[in-house]
Amino acid sequence: NYGMCGRAFSPRFLWMWPNARISVMGGEQAASVLATVRRDGIEGRGDSWSMEEEEAFKAPIRNQYEEQGHPYFATARLWDDGVIDPADTRRVLALGLSASLNAPIPETKFGLFRM
């Protein structure tokens, strides 16, 4: 949910479904990037890195991303406003929109973005 208006974007509310994941990238992508950097460093010194060593390096990274990207890991650290049942989405969204209408909208200090 980070790219879909995570905390860095200062949303008024941020809920997650039980099947959501929160991270900047997936575990496999992160492990591959870090392995590429490690491999380039090793090969730059003239050494070699076997596929088994690379897999052993990548496995804990994938596991960490899977564990820490879980919605209950995130909500336990107050990174969101809670995990909601998908069946309750309309009700929760309606309550959030209703509550948002009571907060003043501050004046912006930036120009118009054209995309």
Image: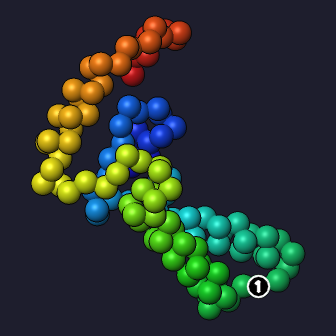
Which residue shows up at 37% across the image and 14% down it? 104
Which residue shows up at 48% across the image and 40% down it? 7
Side of 17 where 87 appears, left or right: left
Q: Which quadrant would residue 4 be assigned to in this image?
A: top left
Amino acid identity at mark 1: Ser
Q: Is residue 110 above or below residue 91?
A: above
Q: Nearer the viewer, residue 6 or 91?
A: 91
Q: Which quadrant would residue 74 be assigned to in this image?
A: bottom left
The image shows residue 29 at horizontal and vertical percentages of 51, 65
Which residue shows up at 35% across the image and 51% down it? 82
Side of 99 where 11 appears, left or right: right
The image shows residue 35 at horizontal and vertical percentages of 65, 72
Side of 82 where 24 appears, left or right: right
Q: Which quadrant would residue 49 be assigned to in this image?
A: bottom right
Q: Is residue 51 above or below residue 42?
A: below
The image shows residue 14 at horizontal and vertical percentages of 36, 42
- Say whether residue 23 is visible: no
Which residue shows up at 40% across the image and 38% down it? 5
The image shows residue 89 at horizontal and vertical percentages of 17, 47
Side of 91 where 7 appears, left or right: right
Q: Of all residues shown, which one is farthest toward the right?
A: 45
The residue identified by callout 1 is 48
Few, some or many residues within 10 Å of mark 1 (<14, 14–19, 20+): few
